[in-house]
Image (tube, helix red, strand yellow):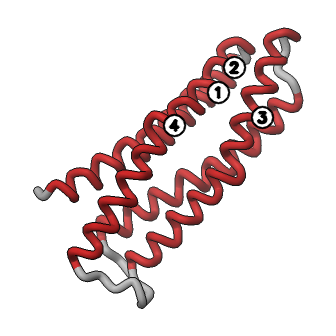
Amino acid sequence: MNVLLFLHIFGVVIFLGNIITAAFWKVSADIKKDPQLIHNTVKNVMLADFIFTLPGLIIIIVSGNLMAVQSGYSMHTFNWLTLSLFLFVLTGIIWLVILIPMQRSMIRHSARSIDDGNISNEYRKASRYWAIFGIAATLLPVVILYLMVTKAS
């Protein structure tokens, strides 16, 4: 297996693995309704994004572009690669514009919930938006993974 392909698959594993497990841990914390646990979890979700999701994203972009150039895939026609890139950009926009601000909001509101001892409505609202858009930002890379594996058009 060539190094670029290995790096690409490694990037996908840490990227997808983190976004799926982060959602699992956050939902698990929310179910327990413990303000301290929720606060620690949402802080760690944000931290994990910078430790795993962002590096995975960079590895995917660099290795994917290099492999596409080496393979001679056309970027001027609509194919599995251009559709995957479009979906990848859409995922990035959701992450940057909606999810990161929602995560910051959840951290802020969960910290206040610790002082009050109750989960605030503001936290619940931010958490609900994070869940809705997080599902989209998780399913889109799964679709991209399918396109990459099958090279469907």
Q: CA distance from mark 3 to mark 1?
A: 10 Å
Query: Closer to the camera, 29 or 96?
Result: 96
Q: Amino acid at mark 1?
A: Val
What crowding class fits label 4: few (fewer than 14 Cα within 10 Å), some (14-19), or many (20 or more)? Answer: few
Query: Closer to the camera, 110 or 153?
Result: 110
Query: Closer to the camera, 61 or 103?
Result: 61
Q: Mark 3 or mark 2: name the one nearer the start of the chain.
A: 2
Question: Do callouts 1 and 2 mark residues in contact (Cβ within 8 Å)?
Answer: yes
Residue pointed to by mark 3 = 105
Residue pointed to by mark 1 = 42
User: Which image quarter: residue 104?
Assistant: top right
What crowding class fits label 1: few (fewer than 14 Cα within 10 Å), some (14-19), or many (20 or more)? Answer: many
User: Which image quarter: residue 107?
Assistant: top right
Residue pointed to by mark 2 = 39
Q: CA distance from mark 4 to mark 2?
A: 17 Å
Which residue is drawn at the image coordinates 51% and 37% (left, top)?
Answer: 50
Left or right of 48 on screen, residue 3: left
Q: Amino acid at mark 4?
A: Phe
Question: Do callouts 4 and 2 mark residues in contact (Cβ within 8 Å)?
Answer: no
Q: CA distance from mark 4 to mark 1?
A: 13 Å
Give the image location of residue 31, x and y in percent: 67, 23
Q: Mark 3 or mark 1: name the one nearer the start of the chain.
A: 1
What crowding class fits label 3: few (fewer than 14 Cα within 10 Å), some (14-19), or many (20 or more)? Answer: some
Left or right of 31 on screen, residue 139: left
Query: Which quarter of the figure is the N terminus placed in?
Result: bottom left
Q: Mark 4 or mark 1: name the one nearer the start of the chain.
A: 1
Foreground disc of the pair 4, 1: 4
Which residue is drawn at the image coordinates 32% and 64% (left, top)?
Answer: 64
Which residue is drawn at the image coordinates 86% and 24% (left, top)?
Answer: 120
Q: Residue furthest bottom?
A: 77
